[in-house]
Amino acid sequence: MLTGKPPGFILTALDSNSGKTMISNMLLSCQEHSAPPLQPYKIGADVFDPGQHCHYSHVPSYNLDSWMMGDQCILKSLSRLTAGYRALIEGWGGVFDTVYPHHKQSTTLHMAALTQYPLILIVDTRRPGIRQQLSQALNRLLKIPAIRIGGIIFNRCSSLTIDYPEFPGIPVLGKIPEQVDLSISASPIQLRQAAQQYLKLKAIFSLSTAHEVTFSRSAVQQQHHSGRKRIAISQDEAFYFYFSDNRHFLNEQQVELINFSPLHDKQLPENLDGLILSGGIPENYARQLANNSALIRDIRMHLQQGLKCYAECGGFMYLGDSLSLLNGENYPMCGVVPGDMKMCPTQQHYGYANCFIDGKTYHGHEFHYARWQQESRQANLWEVTTCSTGQSRREGFHSKNIHASFVHLYFPRCADLICGFFEL
């Protein structure tokens, strides 16, 4: 349980694709025009929804994944919430969904019990039999002692005048009509106007009361460095995914992080002790990355000279000899990891994974459509076992100064590996 907790609430739904991310973004778009400010979070190791949160909130969004992080790291991450802010936590899947059978971690119910934040249940009214499903779900939730239901938002309503089921003590916090176009391309203004028109914002924001916490806003969003280590980290349209808490972890190790862009910068920042190439979607920018040959040469030179480089997923792809797209186009990359990175029409690996190296096990997560063509012959970093299938393989590329893999790690849970690699 989160004691002395900052305020917050959890947006969940009966099923996936019911509008959790859209409604999260609607609320985040109200940031600058209403109190209180919101800090977004996403349950699970999702790559894309936190990126949307950042777009509409203009603050980093944090993943909350108990399998990757452990409950104590989740509570620590929430404890950093700035005084006066509320946590907006977007749930994973449906409210009763689990990652694997009998797997309760990283689910919405697990997070609600851990934080004791109220649930706002989003209901897609277009679903067949939705009235009965809603009644059954609420009856089931009300029998769980640790769960509190803050209210219901009806989404994609055919008419706002149609009566929807009412449940004693559970308020309706909004009705959003089906004809309202709030797709991923909607502007913050469109989302804010829709939120003001169709949601009961005052009731939503007053579900929990803000109070002072021990962390100041500057402590959360600004970095204070001792200058002991300087590490460059990729941050642009092509490389944008990493767990936001990883930056906090490195700051706590007195690391100075310097953002740079593989798309736009012609050389790495000066006087570096390390380099982090984060995940992303380099396949969407393959031509631009290849055309920035000056930076590719600079990265190759620094790594040949021994600069430490940690690369995840998209960053791993960038280090390869080349990147082959689905349309047959092939573009040269950094040429540090031998072999081509080939995009495939289906996911190659997805989900939680156990990574075994030097007698230790680390929790990781994979999500990629690319295949390293030389993996069966050149992989030498560690043994990776996919949790959903139990299948194992040699994965990743390792040298004395390179750690490159498709696996995403949560740094605070593998501090010995990260600190050992960067000599922190």
Image (cartoon, rainbow, N blue to C red):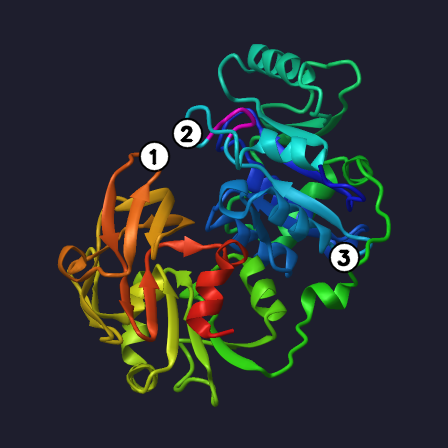
At label 2, the amino acid type is Tyr
Q: CA distance from mark 3 to mark 1?
A: 37 Å
* x, y percent for residue 45: 48, 46
Looking at the image, do the residues carrying marks 3 and 1 touch, with CB atoms under 8 Å apart? no
Dot in front, 3 or 1: 1
Looking at the image, do the residues carrying marks 2 and 3 touch, with CB atoms under 8 Å apart? no
User: Which residue shows up at 68% across the image and 44% down it?
Assistant: 88
For label 3, the crowd category at 10 Å Cα-Cα, with few meaning under 14, some 14 to 19 and many 20 or more, is many
User: Which residue shows up at 35% across the image and 62% down it?
Assistant: 314
Q: Which residue is at the front of the view, 214 or 340?
A: 214
Q: Which residue is at the front of the view, 21 or 68?
A: 68
Left or right for 116, reference 179: right
Earlier residue among tags 2 and 1: 2
Q: CA distance from mark 2 to mark 1?
A: 7 Å
Residue for badge 2: 100
Residue for badge 1: 388
Looking at the image, do the residues carrying marks 2 and 1 touch, with CB atoms under 8 Å apart? yes
Earlier residue among tags 2 and 3: 3
Residue 82 is labelled as 3
User: Which residue shows up at 42% across the image and 82% down it?
Assistant: 265
